[in-house]
Amino acid sequence: MQSLAKTKAEQQSMEMAKAVIAKEPTPEQIAEERIYATMGVSDSEYEIICSLLGGRKPNYTEIGVFSVMWSEHCAYKNSKPLLRRFPTTGERVLVGPGEGAGIVDIGDGQAVCFKIESHNHPSAIEPFQGAATGVGGILRDIFSMGARPVALLNSLRFGQLSDERVRYLFEHVVEGIAGYGNCMGIPTVGGEVMFDASYEGNPLVNAMCVGLIDHKDIQSGVAKGIGNPVYYVGPPTGRDGIHGATFASEELTEESEAKRPAVQVGDPFMEKLVMESCLELIKSGIVIGIQDMGAAGLTCSSAEMASKAGNGLELNLDEIPQRERGMTPYEMMLSESQERMLFVIEEKNEPIAMEIFNRWGVICRQVGRVTDDGRLRLVFDGEVVADMPVKGLVDDCPVYDKPASEPAYYQANAAVDTTSYPAASDLNDALLRILGSPTVASKEWVYSQYDHMVGTNTSVSPGSDAAVVLVRGTRKALAMTTDCNGRYVYLDPNVGGKIAVAEAARNIVCSGAEPLAITDNLNFGSPEKPDNFWQMQQSVDGMAEACRHLSTPVIGGNVSLYNENTKGSIYPTPVVGMVGLVHDVDHITTQGFKQEGDIVLLLGATKAELGGSEFQLVMHGVTEGRPPAIDLDVESRLQRTVLESIQQGYVQSAHDLSEGGLAAAYAECCISGRTGATGNVSVEGLRSDIALFSESQSRVLLSIRPVHVEAVQAVCATYEVPVQQLGVVGGERIQLKVNGVSAIDVAREEAERAWKDAIPCLMR
Amino acid sequence: MKVAVLVFPGSNCDWDCVHAAEQTIEGAVVDRVWHTTDTLEGYDLIMIPGGFSYGDYLRSGAIARFAPVMQAVAKAAAEGVYVLGICNGFQILTEAGLLPGALRRNTGLKFRCHSSQLHVANADTAFTSGYAAGEVIDIPIAHGEGNYYCDDAVLEQLKARNQIVFTYTDNPNGSVADIAGVINEQGNVLGMMPHPERAVNSLLRNEDGIRLFTSIMKAWRERHAIVG
């Protein structure tokens, strides 16, 4: 135990804090001047808080604590009713939503733990630190469950790269992600980046982490055992990130720049030490409960840990390690300083914990105890400075079912005929333009800044449909991807939501894995706008339906609302992070064509579907109409066909058709395989440009050794999946006819240049 | 053969080195050795792994050189024990003065991680005897500060004494004379920015690094006259 005697510096610091506390608004002032409103608390919420305190008005610290706990970011007060619509259980689900991260069984006593989380608003203001601490936060979510992180992914959205500010954000977000993940030594193996004007000023930065854990090591953030000590681990608390959760739960405005101090600063080196020491602590078997300090820092972690056990918690704030002098209880409780954890053990085990943290050079200090009275009580300089019911903080935030209404644009789009654009005269040029569009173009500029190989388990690096990470010591591997086409979701949120899940699963299957489960990051505009809330409802319903159909439950996720810029809301972007299980490393499949003479098969049906397509945007400058339709039964049969064919050993390469349609996918297979191909696609009644660039769903390109073609066709027949022999791998040109008429004929190298050089050129 | 893989706070390729050594060096006994250890008695190969020792704060490798274990490394190196520094390990060896030169930020100012083609410039070392002179091999890089620098006089010396072991075919970071790896005069301490431990597994589609480890094993066996 620490000495109770304060040093002179500590005494001075305490006096400074007390001088500040004396100037804090009184409970009466908070009520009369509606100071709570500046913290995002409404009048009616304030009334509820008073009644939860037994009729007493909250003091400044208490209202601060309530305001962050009741922010959208922590309480999901606007999204809870929607989240209940997701299927969250399944045979393999070991831990569902509600803990730091979900966990799914992968056999042999092993499990995979994963979650995605947004750091959109901080990244809009301070892109490097915003993105870096996003990575840091999601890593802590994973290792606080007891899992060792094995891979990072991300899903990014920016405005158009022609804009200087967008280039600045893009450059520094990527650098921030790289800086944190690389230093931690966790490979960043995959993700997606899309560019659209709708994200200008409000980029999306969603980070996902995947970890491995043995069933027996699974932890919970629970403060059990009355009288047990509570420990603080990590660097001292500073004044950074105060009110970060509140900041994340409001729209960005011109004044947001002034909230730069609400953005935290990351130290990946410290996180590495905290991670290693905490994993060692967990392995020692003495941990009762452990949780990271993420959004709303000490407040959220302590309240949630107490809540899960149905207990109370008393924190002695004098013991909180502090980086700055004169910190008040309000500041300590609301700080979002990074790389901190809270855990509970039995007192007798303290020496074991201290030995571990001392060896790693990480601060660990007892800061409180578990109590039986269900209160979160804060003591400062011997006095109780806040005393609140845990249940009130965690469970009693009102939940709002916001009004939703179908937006006018949705009806207007019903009338748009996306087949009526003038036919593209030069299809080679159209292909090169699409390959060079930043959304489709090679993301090598991005992922070459990420250490995607550290850990030496990355079997499939960024750039294929899904990344594949080996599970050391087994024949198993994990496939992982993030997906969402916000344009589809905007045009039809229900269909777009379904497609986001279906495409993620298709990517997983094309890599040779069985889809297991998803984590979702619901990025939307302000829920106060009925149009936006309608988008949320519709897309959640679509996603939920697809999850049920494809047997991929939702095991956790994150909601980010109030993503707005001066022109309006972002495209609704419910990002899906999916993990699949490769049962045998022999099944691992990539997108590039492999061998001259292999036969290219197109599975699935091509229809005239240009709504929300890359072609529509690049060639005609619009995003309108209805997005491609999706039939989940067809999708699921397609996926079974592909997976079975791969598992039978018939498949040389597999690539799903997405942005840019058949032509882009075909070119990508050639570029990745460093070969050409010759072929013809038969699509009755479709114009060549539509046939090539339509983004009809449930389609996959396979390349197959000639000897296996019949076998694959038989699998297709079993599942009633349309299949056509599209062409042959070989040569140095990418050639594709449509209904026997020459359509695409470009040198592979030329296509490769257009695809590879696009982003580096724009960033130069 | 006993192998030590050093672990500094912030090392993150230590396990990769352990796995690579165990997989490629027959009968290897591999220990992870904590930075506070002050003796490396009994080890035949010391690997200093990649990562961000001490957060790479101040300058990469600049703080690690003061760790107690580095005294032991210097002693072992002087006694002829094989020392292999990879990436951050190379940076530490130059900071510790066990290898000439220094590593600066990449000229593009960005971290770069990708496969890289290397010329085996000297196949006549304990680390490279399994390669053919002039052979081109693929060993991935992952670094932000891999831009090797030395002055002209040192460069001439390195050339004259055949101390340049690997050069890039397509210089990714601005290194002087395309240098990717150098060896000390005695021929028992090799530093290189590329990661051979990432190139020892067919499932990762690259096995070009295996021969680096088997070369060390062969040299050690020859030194100890072990037949087999």
Image: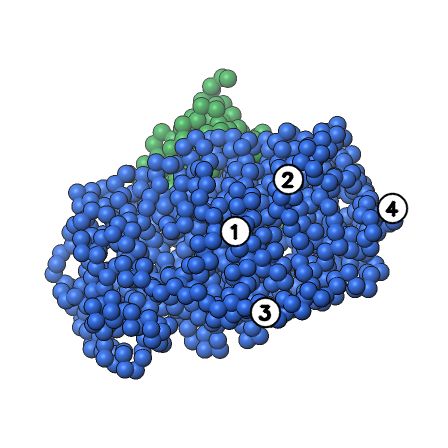
Name which residue lies at 34% across and 32% down: B41
N-terminal of the two: label 4 or label 1?
1
Viewer-proximal residue, A83 or A734?
A: A83
Viewer-proximal residue, A215 or A82?
A: A82
N-terminal of the two: label 4 or label 3?
3
Count of marks placed on residues:
4
CB atoms of marks 1 and 2 within 8 Å? no
How far separated are the C-alphas under marks 4 and 1? 41 Å
Give the labeled residue for mark 1.
A544
Is residue A461 in view? no
Q: Which chain is blue?
A: A
Q: Which chain is green?
A: B
Relative to residue A327, is residue B194 drawn left or right? right
Give the labeled residue for mark 2.
A637
Tell me which amino acid carries mark 3.
Answer: Pro
Circle 4 residues within 10 Å: few <14, some 14–19, many ≥20? few
Give the labeled residue for mark 4.
A740
